[in-house]
Image (cartoon, rainbow, N blue to C red):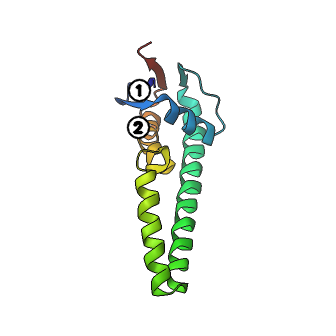
Amino acid sequence: MSLIQFSSVATGPFILFRETAERIFKSINEPFRDEGAFAAEDLPDVLARLDAAAAEDKAKAAALEAERERRLREGTYDDEIRAREADREEEEKNRHREDAVRLYQRIVPLQEMIRRAIRHDKPVMWTKLGR
């Protein structure tokens, strides 16, 4: 797994796994390259797309949780015990999966960097670390 470092003169850098960066770029319909930059004048549009992707992912997470809660409320006590046991097993199985941390949570550092870069009228750049 390679790493991608995002940086801007307006703030300190942060690092993401390449796969996470690709996932973020896909969510905003932006082609991903190992190195690149968002020009200062493009940042408001990029931020709006990131905000929309985060809101969509939050809504999906809330809908999944609401459905799980509905199933628990409508079921019997035995159904609830089985559902909780299945949830624990699923959680254990997926402990190290990409979805363990939701997309909207992974977007936050980039959103904050872009907000600061907009305030200072600076670009946001990224580059691959290592080989």
Q: Going by the picture, which residue comes out furthest to the left? A: 12
Q: Tell me if residue 40 can be seen.
A: yes
Query: Whole-percent x and y of residue 72?
Result: 50, 79
**Residue displayed at 60% across by 44% down:** 49
Q: How many marks can you see? A: 2
**Residue displayed at 47% across by 74% down:** 82
Please name the amino acid that badge 1 sits on. Answer: Ser
Please name the amino acid that badge 2 sits on. Answer: Arg
* Distance of label 2 from label 1 (alpha carbons): 9 Å
- Crowdedness of circle 1 by 10 Å Cα count: few (<14), some, many (20+)? many
Question: Observer-nearest residue: 102 or 81?
Answer: 81
In this rendering, the answer to whether 82 lies above or below 95 is: below
Q: Which residue is mark 2?
A: 116
**Residue displayed at 46% across by 79% down:** 80
In this rendering, the answer to whether 45 lies above or below 76 is: above
Query: Whole-percent x and y of residue 71?
Result: 55, 78
The residue tagged with tag 1: helix, strand or loop?
strand
**Residue displayed at 53% across by 61% down:** 61
Which numbered tag is attached to residue 8? 1
Q: Tell me if residue 101 can be seen.
A: no
Question: Observer-nearest residue: 73 or 122?
Answer: 73
